[in-house]
């Protein structure tokens, strides 16, 4: 085996070549189901294992370098790549797109670092954001998004814009319906066996594009530090909001399908004669009972902040007294979130207004599948706001998602359906 030149390969190329080796190994195994390898097949399989180990080490080294670079940016605002900061790179993009402008050679280093065909045109200012800036910015966006950070995220490879995943088509835990049709039974000696099999459905996700547009004055463009701070912070905050809003209430048309519009959502009824715009302990108990037991350990309560005052007054009647239901978060050394039934209570901006669907939700976002591709891309134009002496900067992020469940689940014993996403009906 000749040693690959990893210095000329992107991280995505390294990963794709490793996956190709794994596919070749699986093919060899499938061709010899009895395990009787020919000497040539055994030698090739051993060679593949060695090559995979080399690629694994390269990926670990590459990812470690990116993580260190992202950490350096977070601590110092400086990069280990050809550009020292996002603002410095954007200044060069602006200069390259100006009439008679000559692109900085470092821009081509960034553009050529991508694998496969590029969607941006370098001569028009469509240079990619340097990978460590892209990684750091996307990492900050996702880490600050309380829903996206809890989703089951799958990054796509360079040549892919969609993914089809196998998912269990299960809507009941009754005998013969588990896993969509798997059955087992107690048999006597000599009894004929009855076959069964799971039912699998296709879960398809296709990348949607989130776009941000920013105008910056020529004076701001001239100041790399200010450009980094203003544009970076603004788009971090905006992308955090929009991604989480889509994961909660997106309609699936040009954006991810949010759980509030998903067919697997369970809505618990309000109590008889319950006052408008209220959340009471009976609601909490009803919602908790509709969360599958296996999902409770990963579930969180998502609320509108206007719900909080009502949580503080909730008590569990004990004789002639009562015990508090809602446990506020402790000091800095304790848990940062308050809890209900031991699960965190997290206020989010995107929750419904008090009294509306989604003002309080019990959710396990580990059952939400989210895909994205790379980091954020940037391009700019001097023409859109020329008479205002401003530049237009555009950022894009491609993402999609939807719940892994396609329907609520009927339990083995009982009639109330269950779901990893539970809300309370309007009051």
Image: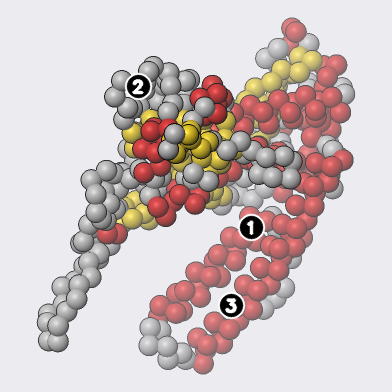
- Image coords of residue 70 (percent x, y): 77, 46
Vertical position of residue 328 compared to residue 382: above or below: below
Q: Is residue 255 visible?
A: no
Q: Which mark is residue 275?
A: none
Report x, y in % for residue 92: 82, 31
- Residue drawn 42% across and 28% down? 280
Q: Earlier in the sequence, mark 3 or mark 1?
A: 1
Residue 296's place in the image compared with 253, above or below, is below
Neighbour tally class for label 3: few under 14, some 14-19, many 20 plus, Cα within 10 Å:
some
Distance, label 3 to label 1, CA atoms, is 17 Å
Q: Residue pushed farthest left? A: 191
Instruction: Read off the residue under disc 3.
Output: 48
Tally of numbered tags: 3
* Lateral position of residue 364 relative to residue 126, left or right: left
Location of residue 21 (image quadrant): bottom right
**Residue 25 position in % (x across, y down):** 51, 75
Answer yes or no: do the residues labelled 3 and 1 have beta carbons within 8 Å?
Answer: no
- Are dots 2 and 3 in contact, CB under 8 Å? no
Q: Residues within 10 Å of mark 1 (few under 14, many from 20)?
A: some
- Tag 2, which secondary structure? loop
Q: For this rendering, which residue is in front, 17 or 190?
A: 190
Residue located beneath label 2 in the image: 274
Q: On the image, numbered disc 1 is attached to which residue?
A: 13
Is 349 in front, or is 25? 349
Residue reaching furthest front?
A: 320
Q: Earlier in the sequence, mark 1 or mark 2?
A: 1
């Amino acid at each position: 085996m000749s040693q690959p030149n990893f210095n000329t390969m992107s991280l995505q190329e390294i990963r794709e070549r490793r996956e190709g080796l794994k596919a070749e190994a699986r093919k060899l195994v499938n061709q010899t189901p009895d395990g009787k390898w020919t000497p040539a097949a055994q030698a090739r399989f051993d060679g593949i294992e060695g090559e995979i180990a080399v690629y694994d080490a390269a990926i670990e080294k590459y990812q470690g370098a990116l993580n260190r670079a992202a950490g350096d940016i977070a601590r110092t605002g400086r990069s280990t790549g050809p550009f020292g900061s996002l603002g410095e790179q954007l200044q060069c993009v602006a200069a390259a797109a100006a009439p008679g402008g000559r692109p900085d050679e470092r821009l081509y280093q960034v553009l050529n670092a991508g694998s496969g065909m590029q969607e941006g045109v370098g001569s028009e200012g469509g240079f990619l954001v340097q990978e460590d800036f892209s990684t750091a910015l996307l990492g900050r966006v996702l880490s600050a998004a309380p829903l996206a950070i809890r989703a089951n995220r799958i990054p796509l490879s360079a040549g892919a814009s969609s993914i089809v995943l196998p998912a269990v088509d299960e809507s009941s835990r009754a005998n013969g319906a588990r896993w969509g049709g798997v059955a087992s039974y107690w048999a006597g000696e000599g009894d004929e066996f009855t076959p069964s099999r799971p039912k699998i459905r296709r879960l398809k996700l296709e990348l949607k594009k989130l776009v941000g547009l920013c105008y910056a004055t020529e004076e701001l463009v001239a100041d790399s530090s200010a450009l980094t701070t203003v544009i970076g912070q603004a788009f971090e905050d905006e992308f955090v909001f929009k991604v989480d809003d889509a994961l909660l209430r997106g309609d699936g048309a040009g954006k991810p399908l949010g759980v509030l519009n998903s067919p697997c959502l369970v809505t618990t009824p309000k109590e008889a004669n319950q006052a408008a715009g209220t959340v009471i302990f009976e609601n909490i108990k009803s919602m908790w009972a509709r969360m599958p037991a296996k999902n409770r350990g990963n579930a969180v309560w998502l609320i509108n902040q206007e719900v909080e005052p009502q949580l503080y007054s909730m008590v569990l009647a004990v004789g002639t007294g009562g015990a508090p239901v809602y446990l506020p978060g402790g000091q800095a050394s304790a848990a940062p979130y308050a809890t209900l039934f031991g699960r965190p209570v997290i206020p989010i901006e995107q929750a419904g207004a008090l009294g509306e669907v989604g003002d309080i939700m019990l959710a396990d976002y580990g059952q939400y599948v989210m895909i994205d591709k790379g980091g954020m891309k940037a391009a700019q134009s001097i023409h859109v706001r020329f008479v205002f002496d401003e530049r237009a900067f555009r950022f894009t992020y491609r993402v999609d998602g939807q719940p892994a469940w396609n329907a609520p689940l009927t339990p083995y014993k009982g009639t109330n359906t269950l779901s990893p996403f539970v809300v309370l009906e309007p009051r």
